[in-house]
Image (tube, rainbow, N blue to C red):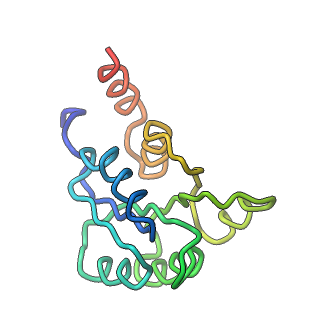
Amino acid sequence: MSYFDKYDFSLLIIDDDQASSYLLEAGLGQHFRNTFIATCGEKALEILSRENDIGFVLLDICMPDMNGFEVLSKIHLLKPDLPAIAVTACIYDGLDKELMDSGFCDYINKPVRVKKLLSKIVKFSHVNQCKFQAHWTAERG
């Protein structure tokens, strides 16, 4: 597989802020088989129940219907090993511990730097790190 092929899984973005979701999709979408967007927890669970190839979740913490912690606990009932990164503007003391204790593999602050986020996805989805680094070097070159 060439580095410029898409990863062999789909990405689910869960964020009530549509602008944030679309920016993430624009920056990351070309790297994945498909990109799905959910604006609430219930919609995310509906997508997960019908789409079998979702291999990674990006999840906002502060949402009105169900917060990211609640959504992740329901996701892990459906797919216990599905990795998720919290994407949040809500930063407070102890957040990193709370996120890790809740089952997130990592988090990133908004506004998101796409290169940094993709690096985290690569790390936690077991995609070859060298492949990622070669791609960014080629894009900048």
Q: In this view, does 122 lie above or below 104?
A: above
Tell me residue 18's x, y (percent). 38, 64
Q: In this view, does 63 lie to the left or right of 4?
A: right
Q: Is residue 42 above or below residue 35?
A: below
Counting every numbered tag in the picture gives: 0
Residue at screen point 24% across, 45% down: 30
Residue at screen point 36% across, 20% down: 137
Tell me residue 82's x, y (percent). 43, 67
Closer to us: 30 or 129: 30
* Residue at the extreme top: 141
Closer to us: 11 or 42: 42
Quadrant (top left/top right/bottom left/bottom right) for the N terminus: top left
Q: Is residue 37 above or below residue 32?
A: below
When asked about the image quadrant of residue 44, the answer is bottom left
Closer to us: 86 or 54: 86
Q: In this view, does 31 lie to the left or right of 67?
A: left
Residue at screen point 70% across, 57% down: 91
Q: Is residue 116 above or below residue 67?
A: above
* Residue at the extreme right: 93
Tell me residue 61's x, y (percent). 58, 68
Quadrant (top left/top right/bottom left/bottom right) for the C terminus: top left
Residue at screen point 39% across, 58% down: 19
